[in-house]
Image (tube, rainbow, N blue to C red):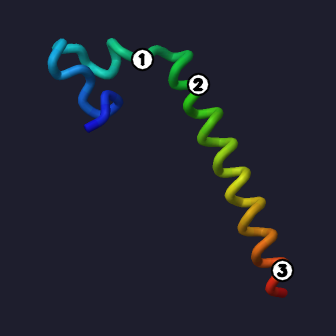
Amino acid sequence: MSTTDYGDEVGGRTPWELFDEADARQTLALAEEAVALARTIIKEVVDDRG
């Protein structure tokens, strides 16, 4: 289980109480970087086959 999905069930805190906008922005930036890297890798694989 993930605290981002269910929060802190033992402590009774929701995800919104555990994470703030800065956390969300950082996570979004990491996700965008991961997508960019995946696109680069896929492009290289496709170009190598062509």
Looking at marks 3 and 2 on the same chain, the residue that comes earlier in the sequence is marked by 2
Q: Which residue is mark 2?
A: 25
Circle number at residue 7: none
Q: Position of residue 37 (x, y in %)?
A: 72, 52
For label 3, the SS is helix
Check whether the beta carbons of the residues at disc 3 and disc 1 lie within 8 A of each other: no
Q: Residues within 10 Å of mark 3 (few under 14, many from 20)?
A: few
Check whether the beta carbons of the residues at disc 3 and disc 2 lie within 8 A of each other: no
Looking at marks 2 and 1 on the same chain, the residue that comes earlier in the sequence is marked by 1
Q: Position of residue 9 (x, y in %)?
A: 17, 22
**Residue drawn at 18 percent across, 12 percent down:** 11
- Three-letter amino acid code at disc 1? Phe
Check whether the beta carbons of the residues at disc 2 and disc 1 lie within 8 A of each other: no
- Three-letter amino acid code at disc 3? Asp
- Three-letter amino acid code at disc 2? Arg
- Quadrant where the image shows the C terminus: bottom right
Looking at marks 3 and 1 on the same chain, the residue that comes earlier in the sequence is marked by 1
For label 2, the SS is helix
Instruction: State how far apart marks 3 and 2 are (Cα).
Output: 35 Å
**Residue drawn at 16 percent across, 14 percent down:** 12
Circle number at residue 48: 3
**Residue drawn at 68 percent across, 58 percent down:** 38
Q: Which residue is mark 1?
A: 19
Q: Position of residue 6 (x, y in %)?
A: 24, 30
Quarter of image, res 25 = top right
Instruction: State how far apart marks 3 and 1 are (Cα).
Output: 42 Å
15 to 42, vertically: above or below: above
Q: Position of residue 36 (x, y in %)?
A: 72, 50
Quarter of image, res 1 = top left
Instruction: State how far apart marks 2 and 1 are (Cα).
Output: 11 Å
